């Protein structure tokens, strides 16, 4: 594959770099979900007596989507790791 920044043919990254990028994506999904959960908790604390809390529902939906995405992707990535002899960090399992 060629690109504007790398005119040579062949892979742009080696296996190690690709694996690091993949783990970074997983870690990012998990981190963003946690940040959204924290924001939802802050909203809940700020509006304890309101049935409809501004911004809470949207954050809860996004967290659910991120959690489903993480579960779906991580299953396949763990399979690839096992078959390729790659190591998944304990915190991403």
Image (spheres, helix red, strand yellow):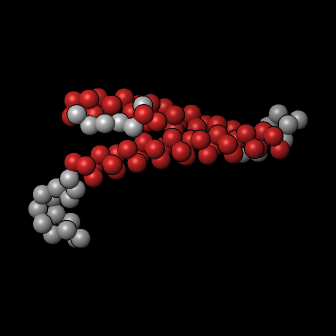
Q: Residue at x 61, y 46 (%)?
A: 35
From the top left corner, tell me how far across and down residue 18 is, in percent.
Answer: 27, 49
Q: Say if 71 sits above or below 2 in the image.
A: above
Q: Is residue 48 left or right of residue 56?
A: right
Q: Residue at x 53, y 45 (%)?
A: 31
Q: Quadrant of residue 62?
A: top right
Q: Quadrant of residue 71?
A: top left
Q: Quadrant of residue 76?
A: top left
Pick the front one: 56 or 9: 9
From the top left corner, tell me how far across and down residue 83 is, in percent.
Answer: 21, 29
Q: Is residue 11 left or right of residue 90?
A: left
Does the image show residue 73?
no
Q: Residue at x 20, y 59 (%)?
A: 12
Number of callouts? 0
Does the image show residue 60?
yes
From the top left corner, tell me how far across and down residue 28 is, in percent.
Answer: 47, 47
Q: Quadrant of the N terminus?
A: bottom left
Pick the front one: 85 or 33: 85
Q: Which residue, as the protein is rendered here, is positioned at the far right?
A: 49
Q: Say if 45 sits above or below 1 in the image.
A: above
């Amino acid at each position: 594959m060629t690109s504007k920044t790398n005119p040579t043919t062949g892979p742009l990254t080696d296996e190690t770099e690709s694996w690091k990028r993949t783990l970074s994506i997983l870690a990012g999904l998990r981190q963003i979900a946690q940040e959204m959960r924290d924001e939802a908790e802050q909203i809940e604390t700020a509006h304890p007596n309101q049935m409809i809390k501004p911004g809470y529902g949207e954050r809860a939906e996004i967290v659910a989507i991120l959690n489903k995405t993480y579960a779906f992707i991580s299953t396949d990535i763990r399979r690839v790791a096992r078959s390729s002899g790659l190591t998944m960090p304990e915190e991403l399992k």
